[in-house]
Amino acid sequence: MVHWYDGFLFGNGLTVYLLSLIKERMPKDLGYLLDIDTFLYELSKSCLYTAEKELFQILYAGKSSHRGDFQRLKEEIYRYYARGGSSNIEYEYGKFLYLREKGAKTYDSDIVMSVFPYLYNFWYNWTYHFLMENCYWEDIRRFYQTIGRCLSKNAKIFTTNFDQYAEMYFPHVQHIHGKFIQLRKLEDLNYVVDGKIEYETIWGYNGLRKWEEILRRRTDSRYDFSFFFDNTLKIRHLLIFGLSFKRAAYVSKEFLEQSSVYKENYDKACMIDGHILERIRDMQNTGNVGEITISYYYQEELAHLSGVLNYYGIKHTRFVPYSKFPFTI
């Protein structure tokens, strides 16, 4: 099953799949490095001395007076994971908002959520250097090469990911939400907006929040937002891989049962990446996007994606299970 796609939009599902393939070739005792949740959980238990030492240097400039703060941070990370948290913090923050409304508090969100973008960037840097130093870059390059065989020569490539593994094969990848940096100190990732500290990487518990951040940064040369604003962009056949277009977590099952009118509402205020769906719909309505192929992992996700795309009026779609794509190392 080989099609020529002249547009490729991928999300974190692709990186998770890549790392799962590499993990099969690694010594079992090092597999935790490729799973951010396991990595941070082990770090919170003081099991990763070298990583802990480096993180303390980044977050607190190695000042011994902040040892207590660092210990509290580790304790909150431990509580976060012990109570079912995950690295999908856009979803987790929405879940926290829902729990807060119910008066339930399971961890200190001010600490965990404010520091998680730094932790995510730190984990990526740590894992990236490990993979490069141990020659796994060849596997990564082969993986993206198998993707390249399904794309036309001048295909446009976009990603919601912050990681830059794809750049090992593709020379031009547009990161529509920003990308990770080489993090050496806390301030490196900071992005100041109207006197308020945000992050260079764009996070948001729904598409509306992300869209507001994109508009604020539209003219900043650090970003390439042509996916959203270039009206000359034309794609005949777009492949979307590793994007599940989840609802925001505060739109809970309980909420939907009580307010059934929202069951078929997938507006960007209700979706984590609804702003992307709006853009694809608008491009299709102006003839700038033709066919769309989208991957899915399981039947429940297929039903969800079908309902979401139908809500936005996105047409000419084809759903393909991820296992049918010849992407491998």
Image: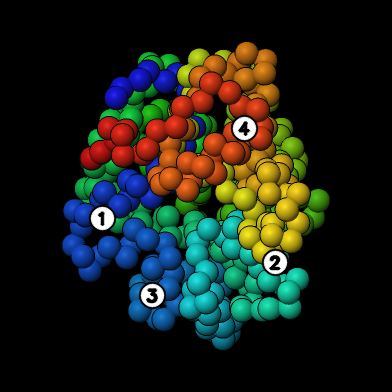
> In front here: 96 or 129?
96
Q: Are marks 4 and 1 in contact (CB under 8 Å)?
A: no
From the viewer's perspective, is 200 left or right of 87? Answer: right
Q: Residue at x 70, y 66 (%)?
A: 98
Disc with the residue nearer the chain's start (2 vs 1): 1
Farthest right residue?
194
Q: Residue at x 69, y 60 (%)?
A: 257
Relative to 151, is 45 above or below? Answer: below
Amino acid type for the residue under numbered disc 4: Asn
Q: Which mark is residue 310?
A: 4
Q: Position of residue 100 (x, y in %)?
A: 72, 72
Q: Residue at x 51, y 42 (%)?
A: 303
Q: Secondary structure at mark 3?
A: helix
How far apart in space, not on screen, are marks 2 and 1 (Cα)?
35 Å
Amino acid type for the residue under numbered disc 1: Lys
Amino acid type for the residue under numbered disc 3: Glu
Amino acid type for the residue under numbered disc 2: Tyr
Q: Position of residue 169 (x, y in %)?
A: 33, 32
Residue topped by disc 2: 98
Residue topped by disc 1: 23
Q: Callout 2: few (<14), some (14-19), or many (20+) C-alpha neighbours within 10 Å?
A: some
